[in-house]
Image: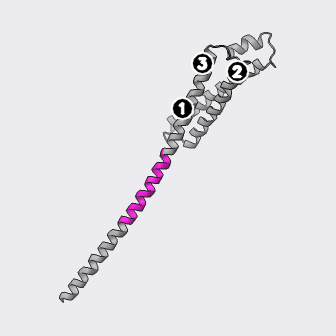
Amino acid sequence: SASIYDKNCLSGGDTEDKFCNRTVLSIVIGCVGTVSSLLVVASKFANSDAPFIMESFVGALLFVLQAFGVAYTTSDNGPGAPLGNLYYSSWFSFVCSFFIGSSCFEEHQAHILMKEQEKEEHRFRKRFQQRSDKRRRANESGMARFTYEED
């Protein structure tokens, strides 16, 4: 995008043209995507338990930005309209951002399922403990009656 902008917009082109504006948009989306992805990766290296909310937010942001990027960059008036590196890389980035978003969604669903299983295990343990206590008390009171009757 940067070389297309330099070639078509800076060297005698109209910088207020739709083509130039869409080229700038694709440059900005690429920079924002790169910086935000690097921040998530750096936070993962610094702390393996990086906040899931941050990762999900960046994934959603990338998906929305890439959706707009593909729409504006590869449309008829965009710099990626002719088949070439920009066209394919725009679509590839969009597909990757979709997979990142779906991965975050699956991780969120797995977390919810795990919490539900933990609650169910806690309820089961509580019921089991109550039944065990009840049996123990019954056995103790039965033994007490049996001992009482023998005396």
Crowd rating for badge 2 (residues with CA inside 10 Å; few <14, some 14–19, many 20+): some
Residue 62 lies in the magenta-colored region = no
In which image quadrant can residue 89 be found? Answer: top right
Residue of label 2: 75
CA separation in Å, label 1 and label 3:
17 Å
Q: Which residue is mark 1?
A: 99
**From mark 2 to mark 1, how far is it between C-alphas?**
23 Å
Apparent side of residue 146 relative to residue 95 in the rendered image (left or right)? left
Q: Earlier in the sequence, mark 3 or mark 2?
A: 2
Instruction: Report, in whole angstroms, how far the alpha carbon at label 3 lies from the one at label 2.
Output: 13 Å
Sequence-wise, the earlier of marks 1 and 3 is 3
Disc 3 marks which residue?
Answer: 88
Check the image and report above or below for 5 versus 97: above
Q: Earlier in the sequence, mark 2 or mark 1?
A: 2
Amino acid identity at mark 3: Tyr
Which quarter of the rendered picture does the N terminus lie within?
top right
Residue shown at the point (66%, 30%) measured from the top left:
65
- Where disc 3 sits, the SS reads helix
